[in-house]
Amino acid sequence: MTTTEIERATGTKYVGRPIDRLDGRAKATGEARYAAEHHYPDLAYAALVHATIARGRITAIETAAARAVPGVIEVLTHENGPAMKPFKVSLLDPLGAMASGTSVNYLATDEVHWNGQPVAVVVAETHEAARHAASLVRPAYEELPAVVDFSAEEPNATPQKRSMLLESEADKGDAKAALEAAPVSVDLRFTTPPHNHNAIEPHATTAAWNGDHLTVHEATQGIPWVRKQLALRFGVPERNIRVLAPFVGGGFGGKGPIWAGTLLAVLAARATGRPVRLALTRAGVYHTVGGRTASTQRVALGADKDGTLTALIHTSVARTGRVGGWQEQITSASRHLYAAPNIHLRQHLVQLDLLPNIPMRAPGESIGTFAVESAMDELAWELGMDPIELRMRNEPERNPVDGKRFARRFLREAYALGVERFGWNERDPRPGAMRDGRWLVGMGVATAYHPAMHLPVSAAVRLSADGGVVVRCAMAEIGVGAATVQAQIAADELGVPLEAVRVESGDSELPLGAMAGGSIQTASVASSVLAACRKLKESALALARRAPDSPLRGRRLPDLEARDGGLFHGVSGETYAAILTRAGRDHLDAAIKPGALGMVGALRDMRRWVKAACGAQFCEVRVDRDTGEVRVSRWLGVFDVGRVINAKLVASQLRGGIVMGIGLALSEETLIDPRTGRIVNASLGEYHVPVHADIPRIDVHWLDEPDPTMPLGLVGVGEVGITGVGAAVANAVRHATGKRIVDLPITLDKLL
Ligand code: MOS
């Protein structure tokens, strides 16, 4: 996109405005229906039975007691369950690499791969009967030795395979020698625990077969993937499957691919001939969905006495499951942060007999930035230097590991604004020097970083003679306001009122390709929506130019302005309604199908530039002098997120990321019994996500500098908010107490 196009967008009516969500009312009133809220007259209810061993075989499974529960329709086990086709992964599937729990042949095998794996499904007339009966199913097992303890297995880690989409490793110069020679250095080892997905809507599927046609109401971030996988596993053509996900109550990566519950609900519906609803319990989410890997990381930094970095070493160990799992890109952000002449970045993995881990908001960067940004802060202490000054001294002009150009980078500006707004200069740099009664006050900063990209997706736009516009795209609305921003974009590009635009999404019958993940959806869809709107303007103009009496005769699109529901040159012009009506057309359609060529172009574009969302996180904590209790008392995030399409929605995304990051810093931790591999805190009562009382006012700002390489200059904002947060908290705690906490979460026992 050219600068003029970006400038034209700047002058527009809706882009940039804090427009209310178009679906806000539907959500607030309960009119919006989620995957577990679709009724069918003969609906049956499913519940899962979870394995209680980490690895082994089922030798027998006792179902008589379950079958005797009134209302039970069927108990499906590996002895009687209909077979699914085996899992197959194609290299061309963008999510194939994260096969995860999808790869298990549920109910077609007696094998158990993790403690909590579904081993039976009960179908009943009510949800309660299904759950009660599920509790009465008794599998017997032959156990096999299982490896479930991450810290014990860590020495056996092996090198991680390279990711096709995201580079994470690097070697530049001789980092080891430079570290040894450095006059000032730090060398720290960090650990982060596993984290669990806790979207407000637990995963749910309602599945209905009609012959060999299947309708699935699904809580998913990726409609195309769900449809494709169901087609493969159940042996029906994709066109026979309709996946509906108009509303999804939070994704964060947890609803990215397709999970056991989806497969088993569809299987249960096929086996019983009834539409089946499976709404996971919260514990069910823990046992079948998963979350972020545990990690250990080493960050070693060497610097000259003036703070100029000479060496940056960042290595990590993460885990996958023996049957699959996401390979987290923990060191990826470290390729882009600092202008060190010697850099060494490496990632390793262990395989555990646990539920495969999956992406969770800024997978890699959220915990990777905790380590590298904590180490930078520690280096600032060693140097006796302000941590912001240290960062600015090492701010690169080009991408440090390979010299590629940044599409844009305004980290200096973000810090400068933050310093002023947060009152950073009032910070007394001595540890423990700032007090408020019995509270030790600390202030810390850290850099936020998340890559930006857009991939080709299909979308279509219809312009009707009545002036209405319909945007059609099977994108996922996971709570971010996806439809609202696309309506703003289409309204501006076509020059029609926002009220004239309707967005249809969340249905596999619509143009496919979009997925809500990797912070790519908004830019990806915007690119196609803009292209479709431009095609429509061309078509409308072509119609007008054929009419002898049209004021647009002889005009070319670049000379015209789209406004007031039509195309204008100065005061002369016509509305789309007038053009279409005169031409006897009810509507005009434009469809964008980028296909493989689009993918090649997108990958080439990704190679050419380093694109990212970044920012400066400012945290103030209060630590109780006697109990070690940590409270976050103030937060400011200043972000460089390209052009902001909707200020309200962007603020929500950034704030939400920061809240989740505060959870990562202070309280979230999936506890796994090292003997059995069982998650022992599989509930919101025992896995502590932040609640309102834990969160201060969060101030977010952005620079609103368009990215010249992205559609409309926008970059995704879904994930950058969580990055850097863990380190900003740890650095504030270091300032308040003098203690460097390297093991998350920062609980009071570590401070006493
Ligand atoms: Mo995400 S972790 O890209 O949904």
Image (cartoon, rainbow, N blue to C red):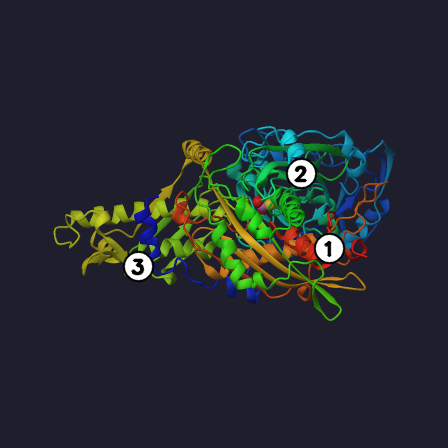
Quadrant into which the C terminus falls: bottom right
Mark 1 / mark 2, whichever is N-terminal: 2
For this rendering, which residue is in front, 275 or 651? 651
Residue ID for mark 3: 466
Residue ID for mark 2: 300
* In the image, the residue with mark 3 has its CB under 8 Å from the nearest atom of ligand 1: no
Q: Residues within 10 Å of mark 3 (few under 14, many from 20)?
A: some
User: Whole-percent x and y of residue 419?
Assistant: 54, 59
What amino acid does circle 3 point to? Asp
What amino acid does circle 1 point to? Gly
Asked whether residue 112 appears in the rendered view, the answer is: no
189 left or right of 648? right
Q: Residues within 10 Å of mark 1 (few under 14, many from 20)?
A: some
For this rendering, which residue is in front, 287 or 730? 730
Q: Is residue 271 above or below residue 574?
A: above
Q: Quadrant of ligand 1?
A: top right
Residue ID for mark 1: 738
What amino acid does circle 2 point to? Ala
Quadrant into which the N terminus falls: top left
- Please tell me whether mark 1 sits on a helix, a strand or a loop: loop
User: Whole-percent x and y of residue 216?
Assistant: 58, 46
Tell me, for residue 154, which label it has, or none: none
Asked whether residue 19 appears in the rendered view, the answer is: yes
- Please tell me whether mark 2 sits on a helix, a strand or a loop: strand
Question: Alpha-carbon distance for marks 3 and 1?
Answer: 67 Å
User: Whole-percent x and y of residue 720?
Assistant: 55, 50
Question: Alpha-carbon distance for marks 3 and 2?
Answer: 64 Å
